[in-house]
Image (cartoon, helix red, strand yellow):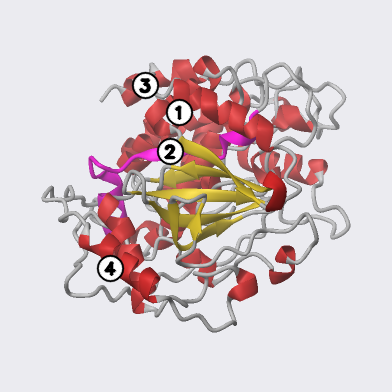
């Protein structure tokens, strides 16, 4: 699902150029604090669900409207994201007087029972270490038609801010190493919770499925932006209603004011200071382009209140299965290409690729030359892995066609190859040596030699 991260597609991703982040005009009575975020759902201005997805009989989306009260308690503020099987909505829970995100499924959604079962177990165990690094479900609800027939199923989640992908785009030139360390530590803690406490493999770790927390006040600012846009800003309403006139009722307008009157004061805690080493030479590597914006984003990421959270845990898998084409194409580990048994290190590969992507701002395993009639080409994906990591050890897949000669038999220093790419971005060797060594262990071709979640968390790199 775009932007909110709930229900993200596992299909091949054709990523756009970084979305522009417009300047938000916040009403003077509700000012933005240093740690607050605005335009949380700006990606919906560029892409949203199709209007015809609402019209299919007995299988379409529910055409929710701003100001509508869902399940007698959730007041809809605006759209928050979309996916193949559901649309997400930012809502205010009248019962507990807090924001939440509603994921409302299509009528024909088939996997919701399994997803709810996993989410309920996560909620039951959420006090265990790492439970706070996974987006938690608040409640489930049903939307009924006549004769008590369920028309749509829904889940209310804790609200979060941007997807990791959106934050990467905002940074203009990527993350600093402290932010990457924090990202890795939080996500490893979340994966340990998923794998050890819940007993599952996430199976689709990528930037779209990692959310960055936002202050409570950020959701009040988002509510203010809906009022400022006269309840009809682009991407705020259901796609099927977008071109229809909308005039809020007096009750709706009044309740928006009621919500805004409850906005908390901005946090008094300052964002941490950040700097980068002085640039060497005349060349301007990517790290030093848009440096002001880069540091602004990284300061927010390093703020003590910012937490990285894994989402979309409803499509998890049990370890030991032999599932072909699991997860998103560009983040599949090599063992999946050879139909091998899946283990917890499946997720470690995806997280390693994601961490490297936050530094370089490029999908490192996205094949460059894929036949148009074969959108998911295993051989093309494997070739790109070789381009980045070098040849896999000969004992792993003996039948794999390999080049001949001494260079083909020479062991590959994966950490050094990764470091070469990172240093071209403007980092010094001593800044990135330890991180590149860890990422190399996360991107081992051999799933049994790949570092596990628990072993990674025990490294001194994450000691603080």
In the picture, the disc for residue 190 is 1
Tag 1 or tag 4, which sits nearer the N-term?
1
Label 2, on which residue? 309
SS of the residue under disc 4: helix
Q: Which residue is mark 3?
A: 127
- Mark nearest the camera among 3 and 1 is 3
Q: Nearer the viewer, mark 4 or mark 1?
A: 4
Residue depth check, mark 4 versus mark 2: number of the one nearer the observer: 4
Residue mark closest to the camera, 3 vs 2 = 3
Question: Helix or strand or loop: what does disc 1 sit on?
Answer: helix
Q: Which residues are magenta?
A: 295-316
How far, Cα to Cα, is label 4 from label 1? 37 Å
Residue under the point 31% across and 47% down: 301
- Residue 89's spot in the image, x, y percent? 50, 57
User: In screen coordinates, is 27 left or right of 7?
Assistant: left
- The residue closer to the viewer here, 214 or 257, is 257
Q: Is residue 25 magenta?
A: no
The relative height of residue 199 versus residue 89 in the rendered view (above or below) is: above
Task: Give me the residue at 63% from left, 33% from top.
Answer: 115
The question of residue 304 being in magenta is answered with yes
Residue 49: horizontal and vertical position, in percent? 65, 64
**What is the residue that sits farthest to the front in this orientation?**
147
Q: In the image as oriented, which residue stretches furthest toward the left?
A: 268
């Amino acid at each position: 699902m775009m932007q909110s991260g709930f229900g993200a597609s596992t299909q091949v991703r054709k990523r756009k150029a970084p979305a522009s982040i417009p300047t938000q005009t916040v009403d003077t009575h509700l000012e933005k604090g240093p740690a607050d975020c605005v335009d949380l759902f700006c990606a919906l201005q560029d892409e949203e669900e199709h209007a015809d997805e609402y019209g299919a009989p007995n299988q379409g989306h529910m055409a929710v409207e701003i100001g509508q009260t869902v399940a007698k308690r959730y007041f809809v503020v605006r759209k928050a994201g979309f996916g193949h099987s559901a649309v997400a909505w930012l809502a205010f829970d009248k019962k507990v007087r807090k924001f939440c995100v509603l994921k409302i499924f299509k009528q024909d959604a088939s996997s919701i029972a399994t997803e709810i079962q996993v989410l309920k177990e996560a909620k039951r165990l959420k006090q265990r270490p790492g439970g706070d690094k996974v987006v938690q479900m608040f409640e489930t609800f049903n939307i009924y038609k006549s004769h008590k027939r369920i028309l749509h199923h829904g889940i209310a989640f804790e609200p979060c801010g941007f997807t990791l992908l959106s934050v990467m785009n905002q940074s203009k030139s990527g993350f600093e190493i402290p932010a990457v360390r924090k990202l890795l530590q939080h996500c490893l803690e979340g994966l340990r919770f998923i794998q050890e406490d819940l007993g599952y493999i996430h199976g689709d770790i990528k930037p779209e499925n990692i959310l960055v927390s936002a202050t409570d006040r950020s959701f009040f600012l988002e509510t203010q932006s809906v009022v400022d846009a006269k309840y009809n800003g682009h991407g705020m309403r259901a796609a099927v209603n977008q071109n229809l006139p909308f005039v809020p009722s007096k009750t709706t307008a009044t309740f928006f004011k009621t919500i805004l009157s409850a906005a908390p004061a901005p946090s008094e805690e300052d964002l941490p200071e950040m700097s980068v080493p002085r640039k060497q030479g005349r060349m301007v590597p990517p790290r030093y382009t848009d440096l002001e914006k880069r540091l602004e984003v990284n300061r927010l990421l390093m703020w003590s209140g910012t937490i990285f959270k894994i989402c979309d845990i409803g499509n998890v898998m049990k370890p030991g299965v032999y599932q072909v084409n699991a997860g998103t194409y560009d983040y599949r580990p090599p063992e999946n290409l050879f139909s091998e048994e899946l283990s917890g290190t499946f997720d470690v590969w995806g997280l390693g690729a994601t961490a490297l992507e936050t530094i370089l701002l490029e999908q490192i395993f996205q094949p460059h030359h894929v036949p148009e009639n074969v959108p998911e080409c295993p051989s093309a994906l494997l070739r790109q892995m070789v381009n980045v990591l070098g040849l896999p050890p000969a004992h792993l897949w003996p039948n794999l066609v390999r080049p001949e000669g001494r260079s083909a038999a020479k062991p590959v220093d994966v950490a050094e190859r990764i470091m070469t790419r990172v240093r071209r971005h403007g980092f010094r060797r001593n800044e990135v040596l330890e991180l590149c060594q860890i990422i190399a262990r996360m991107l081992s071709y051999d799933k049994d030699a790949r570092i596990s979640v628990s072993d990674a968390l025990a490294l001194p790199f994450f000691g603080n």
